[in-house]
Image: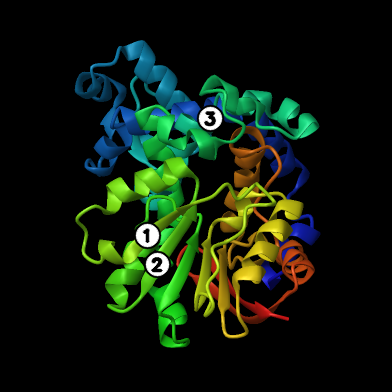
């Protein structure tokens, strides 16, 4: 654990008054979230950003088409949440002038925050009502309002369009930022010509690979529904003829990875193992090991929460674990280094190299047969 995180999680830093305020913030967090989301939806923060001198409640109502009552509720909530401020000379008037705070600026402009808001509203919000049930029973009870699937991955292609788009945007935002550095690690340092992309989803990483290296051939290992989605997504793209699919249920302990005499040069798992429990991870890694040769490198790219440089990143990741609990599968999480290394070693592999701080806080663990 880095120094900043260790200090944050081993020392009490708040005064009693600050701690009480934070406790109330937690108690009202659902309302805080929805009110803040609506400030974005109705364009109110956009308006305040574009009007440096601020806007009155009356002006906001006129521009949004909302009633004075609705604007008053939202702006008073935003004021106490901390996303807007009142100008001092109007604070005691019946119709104060509002400006945007620093917190409001980040809520509006930080790409990660916007992706997280859509993900939590569209994918998680209703399902988290059943978090207690999910934790006690080890199943994604919150997924049931979307469909009858045992995990979100079987149902991904059938989710409502807005839900699926928010899910994919969340998934891709965090992985895509790491791709340029990851390509250098996979292709520049090691002689990679054949690569298994395990859990390749829509084929975004595979397309990056065939675009980066004209000789590489990629085999995506994933569920049949995801393979079909990948083929549709890659159709006609440059290098798509060097991308193939291998349908596999990775939860089936008896489902082997495809084997060849030479074995793949590389096996790639990006934001993938966090979708499984630790026993399932060991099973997947053992089957990957059986397909490896002495020269194969297995790359595990994960946002390990204990390796983050900054506390907000660790916060986002531990909260994401609760998505896995209630929505995704009921038994996985965002792991720390100790848990991941334990699984790797139990599978008969060892970590040869570690690359930290890629993109949005990713690490790559480069593994070989031990």
Evaluate whether residue 190 shows in this view: yes
Give the spatial CA distance, label 1 vs label 2: 6 Å
Q: Of callouts 3 and 2, which one flags the residue occurring earlier in the amino acid sequence?
A: 3
Q: Is 294 located above or below residue 199 in the figure? A: below
Query: Could you tell me which quadrant the C terminus lies in?
Result: bottom right
Q: Which is nearer the N-term, disc 1 or disc 2?
A: 2
Q: Which residue is mark 3?
A: 32
Q: Which residue is mark 1?
A: 244
| Location of residue 244 by image quarter | bottom left
Q: Residue tagged by mark 2?
A: 218
Task: Answer above or below: position of 317 versus 330.
Answer: below
Q: Secondary structure at mark 3?
A: helix
The image quadrant of residue 295 is bottom right
Image quadrant for the N terminus? bottom right
The residue at the point 41 percent across, 54 percent down is 173
Name which residue lies at 36% across and 49% down. 230
């Amino acid at each position: 654990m880095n120094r900043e995180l260790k200090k944050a999680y081993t020392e009490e830093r708040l005064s009693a008054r600050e701690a009480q305020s934070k406790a109330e913030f937690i108690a009202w967090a659902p309302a805080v979230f929805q009110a803040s989301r609506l400030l974005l939806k109705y364009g109110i923060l956009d308006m305040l950003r574009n009007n440096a001198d601020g806007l009155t409640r009356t002006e906001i109502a006129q521009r949004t088409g909302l009633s004075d009552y609705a604007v008053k509720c939202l702006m008073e909530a935003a004021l106490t949440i901390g996303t807007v401020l009142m100008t001092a000379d109007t604070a005691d008037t019946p119709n104060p002038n509002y400006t945007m705070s620093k917190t409001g600026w980040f809520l509006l402009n930080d790409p990660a925050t916007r992706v997280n808001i859509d993900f939590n509203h569209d994918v998680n919000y209703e399902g988290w009502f059943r978090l207690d049930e999910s934790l006690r029973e080890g199943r994604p009870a919150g997924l049931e309002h979307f469909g009858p699937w045992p995990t979100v991955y079987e149902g991904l292609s059938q989710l409502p369009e807005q839900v699926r788009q928010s899910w994919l945007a969340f998934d891709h935002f965090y992985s895509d930022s790491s791709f340029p550095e990851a390509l250098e690690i996979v292709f520049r340092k090691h002689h990679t010509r054949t690569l298994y992309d395990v859990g390749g989803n829509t084929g975004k990483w595979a397309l990056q690979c065939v675009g980066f290296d004209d000789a590489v051939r990629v085999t995506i290992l994933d569920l049949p529904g995801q393979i079909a989605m990948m083929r549709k997504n890659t159709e006609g793209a440059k290098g798509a003829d060097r991308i193939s699919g291998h349908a596999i249920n990775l939860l089936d302990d008896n489902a082997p990875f495809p084997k060849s005499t030479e074995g793949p040069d590389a096996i790639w798992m990006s934001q993938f193992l966090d979708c499984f429990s630790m026993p399932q991870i060991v099973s997947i890694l053992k089957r990957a090991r059986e397909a490896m040769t002495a020269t194969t490198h297995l790359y595990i790219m994960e946002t390990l929460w204990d390796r983050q440089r900054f506390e907000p990143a660790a916060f986002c990741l531990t909260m994401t674990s609760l998505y896995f609990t209630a929505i995704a599968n009921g038994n996985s999480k965002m792991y720390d280094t100790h848990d991941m290394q334990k699984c790797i070693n139990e599978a008969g592999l060892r970590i040869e190299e570690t690359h930290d701080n890629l993109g949005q806080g990713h690490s790559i663990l480069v593994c070989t047969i031990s």
